[in-house]
Image (cartoon, grey):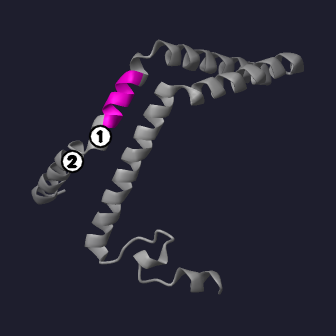
Amino acid sequence: MNKEILKACAELAKAISEDDRIAKLDEAKAAYETDAEIKNLMAEYNVQQIALAEEYKKEVRDEEFIAIINKRISELYTLISENAVMRAYMEANDEVNALMNEVNSEIQFFLTGERACTHDCSSCKSNCSSKNND
């Protein structure tokens, strides 16, 4: 990669890092990484997954034990996914992913002169609806 492109990348990264969504993700990640409840839930979830995998490796499986583990994994998944810290982290992560997709789309536009298809036919020159009818 030449120096001009590297310099442009550094400038772009600096601009992106100043976006509020990046700060929000950093805060949400810090909260996630220090939250004792989510750490405990994730640790138990991982242990249950390992126990389930080990049980499935056996020639003779204890189906009752498997059902108990599956029930607990389901409970843990619900607790994790409903946890406010986890939700905030996932939402912030989704927002940053959307930002990066927007950035990539703009770079693509500047390279090709065409907007990426968003499935909203007003954003590109292509007539998507006619392609689906072929």
At a point 44% along the width and 78% down the height, the residue shown is: 122
Q: Which mark is residue 32?
A: none
Please state which of the two labelled residues, at mark 2 or mark 1, is closer to the viewer.
1
Image location (x, y in percent) of residue 36: 47, 12
Image location (x, y in percent) of residue 85: 47, 26
Image location (x, y in percent) of residue 6: 15, 53
Position of residue 48 in the picture relative to residue 34 (left or right): right
Image location (x, y in percent) of residue 121: 48, 77
Task: Judge the density around disc 1: few (<14), some (14-19), many (≥20) Cα neighbours within 10 Å.
Answer: some
- Report how far apart the C-alphas of labels 2 and 1 lie in the structure: 11 Å
Q: Give the vertical position of 29 relative to 35 (above or below).
A: below
Q: How many numbered marks, from 0 up? A: 2
Instruction: Determine which quarter of the picture holds residue 130.
Output: bottom right
Residue stretch in magenta: 24-31
Chain-order first, disc 2 or disc 1: 2
Instruction: From the viewer's side, name the closer residue of 69 and 16.
Output: 16
Q: Which SS class for mark 2?
A: helix
Q: Which residue is mark 1?
A: 22
Q: Quadrant of the N terminus?
A: bottom left
Q: Quadrant of the C terminus?
A: bottom right
Q: Main secondary structure of the magenta part?
A: helix
At a point 40% along the width and 46% down the height, the residue shown is: 95
Residue 58 visible, this orientation: no
At a point 25% along the width and 45% down the height, the residue shown is: 19
Task: Judge the density around disc 2: few (<14), some (14-19), many (≥20) Cα neighbours within 10 Å.
Answer: few
Instruction: Determine which quarter of the picture holds residue 112.
Output: bottom left
Position of residue 83 in the picture relative to residue 122 (left or right): right
